[in-house]
Amino acid sequence: MRMLINVPERVVGDALRGMAAAHPELAVDVEQRIVRRGDAPVADKVALVSGGGSGHEPLHGGFVGPGMLDAACPGEIFTSPVPDQMARAAAAVDSGNGVLFVVKNYTGDVLNFEMAAELAEDEGVRIRTVLVQDDVAIDADPASGRRRGTGATLFVEKLAGALAEEGAALDEVEALARRVADASRSFGVALSAVTTPAKGGPMFDLPDGELELGIGIHGEPGRERRPMMTAQEIADAAVDALLEDLTPDGPVLALVNGMGATPLIELYGFCAEVHRVLGERGVAVARTLVGNYVTSLDMAGASVTLCQADAELLRLWDAPVRTTGLRWGA
């Protein structure tokens, strides 16, 4: 195992200590595993709290700051944070205007955030929850009617965070977050398997010369395996899968996201192909974000997320944001 770590059991704690050292504007509680804005709670503002298993950085701790999240709770690698952790985070950032939980649709996250909401509400904190379920690679779970939550989480956190920063009420922020989640779809592809510190080797077998279309961010199986494809062929497959499920009647926001081990030169080349196929399908792209934002440790590959946008969403996307993982504007 070639990893820049001490021991697997301390990976998350060590990373949080490093985040605290590098970013004094954040309040990083290594013991309780909470990352929050240093100025939280912000008066007269709805707070946004998210979290999930570590290994997807900069999601979620890298998106804490003005214009995005007020707090994030990292769990162990690919493991949900615990309810007490999230309830403490909610209490720490609540200004009295309520807290919105942004939750990716994985069983552990959903159950633990539900319990956290109950704990927080028992302490007088108003909680609303928005579920992100954007992955079109697999059919919805028959039991829940829902899909995995992936890249659209960034869109929800950025756009709802911008609205909250403007002083909108909890009902408005919740409604906007739900609208963004409903208007977003994602599709991912893996070129290599992911290696976790605890396992010390690949989580699944992906033979040389093959790729997996529709991979999940924890290495969950996708739609199918194929012989290695060109960036053009992968973009055609990914965008067609997205547009089977999303029919934009206007421009879109596009996220071309790296899975952790794909360099920017490849991601920008892939972005060019995504723009090409969207243009061929008659879909205008209003804004594009390229980089490693919702990752899977050291997996090579990429995902594409589209969100149907309107004037309000474009305004909120362009609004200032100051986090360690996303930063623009004043």
Image (cartoon, rainbow, N blue to C red):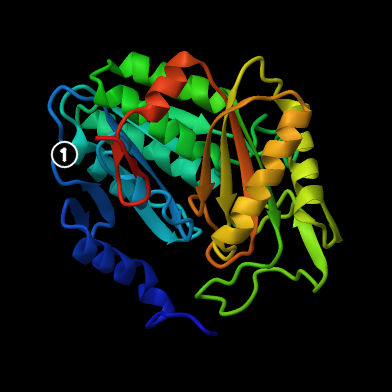
Name the image quarter holding the C terminus. top left
Q: Is residue 139 above or below residue 28?
A: above
* Secondary structure found at label 1: loop
Amino acid type, label 1: Ala
Which residue lies at the image location 67% right of the left edge and 37% below the top edge? 275
Which residue lies at the image location 59% right of the left edge and 63% below the top edge? 262
Name the image quarter holding the N terminus. bottom right
Q: Is residue 264 left or right of residue 328?
A: right
Q: Which residue is mark 1?
A: 40
On the question of residue 142 being in view, the answer is: no
Q: Is residue 254 left or right of residue 59?
A: right
Residue 285 % position (x, y):
60, 29
Which residue lies at the image location 23% right of the left edge and 19% below the top edge? 167
Question: Which image quadrant for residue 24?
Answer: bottom left
Task: State the count of labels.
Answer: 1
Residue 92 % position (x, y):
18, 41
On the question of residue 229 being in view, the answer is: yes
305 and 275: which one is in front? 275
Q: Is residue 25 left or right of residue 278?
A: left
The residue carrying pointer 1 sits among few (fewer than 14), some (14 to 19) or many (20 or more) residues within 10 Å by Cα, namely some
Which residue lies at the image location 43% right of the left edge and 77% below the top edge? 8
